[in-house]
Amino acid sequence: CCTAQLKGKKVIVTAGGTREAIDPVRFIGNHSSGRMGFAIAKAAVLAGADVTLISGVTNLETPLGVKRIDVVSTRDMKQAVDSLYDDADVVIKAAAVADYRVQTPAKDKIKKSEDTLILSMEKNPDILYGLGQRKKNQILVGFAAETTHVIQYGTEKLKKKNLDMLVANDVSAAGAGFKVNTNVATLLFPDGTNEKFDIMDKFDLAAIIIDRVTKIINKS
Ligand code: C5P
């Protein structure tokens, strides 16, 4: 169904994990593969949108027709997203963002002389929270990886971050979360409704997410 439902719409998707430098050769990262976000970018392009994918480090191929901006740290990602936000119609934040960064990354490689190494870390900005605060007409979609109380924690996140839709993953479920090609998700909406899906391919879930975004746009 519905080709070109998002024709003329500017969609920003963030994907993959961010990395925080410890020294010039080491970093703190996470297991995000970027697959969910790349699938969403592809589904959005197929729906006719003008898509910019802001990606952490991944080895995935850029979907055809998608503009890609590569970033490394959370603050890089924030800068890229913030600079495009005012003109955007939809922002989908599938990235796994590092919540903390090393306070003072070492200029030179740290030598392994001591038996213990203590890294002092400070909190990164919450990119999505900032977007929620600045929201005008944009449709804002967030992700949440939970292991328990998926609906309760998801609903709290949806409200706190001022989102139009939240994709909550039960990452403890088989076939959900990082590195796999499938996902298990519940979509939550501000009116308190939700839709729970069984395990499915990430691209199929991406198509559903884009379809629900289109419905939100058509209602507003
Ligand atoms: O609060 P939590 O990290 O669970 O929220 C996840 C959602 O918030 C994801 O959409 C993620 O991309 C976004 N996020 C962010 N900046 C952060 C942390 C999370 O944009 N520092």
Image (tube, rainbow, N blue to C red):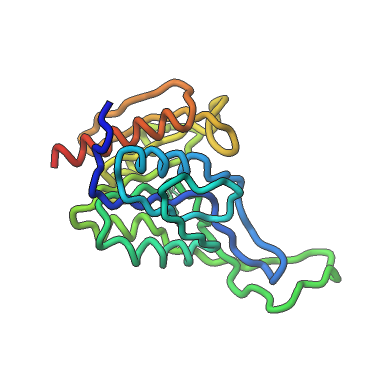
Look at 62% across and 68% down and name the residue there: 120
Look at 21% across and 38% down and name the residue there: 216
Look at 28% across and 55% down and name the residue there: 132
- Front-lying residue, 52 or 145: 52
Residue 160 visible from this viewpoint: no
| Labels in figure, total | 0
**Location of residue 118 in the rendering, given as x and y in whole percent from the top left corner:** 70, 66
Q: Quadrant of the C terminus?
A: top left
Q: Residue furthest top?
A: 198
**Location of residue 134 in the rendering, given as x and y in whole percent from the top left corner:** 25, 61
Would you place residue 43 above or below residue 51 in this image?
above
- Front-lying residue, 179 or 6: 6
Q: Residue furthest front?
A: 64
Residue 191 visible from this viewpoint: yes
**Location of residue 175 in the rendering, given as x and y in whole percent from the top left corner:** 56, 26
Look at 33% across and 45% down and name the residue there: 141
Q: Quadrant of the N terminus?
A: top left
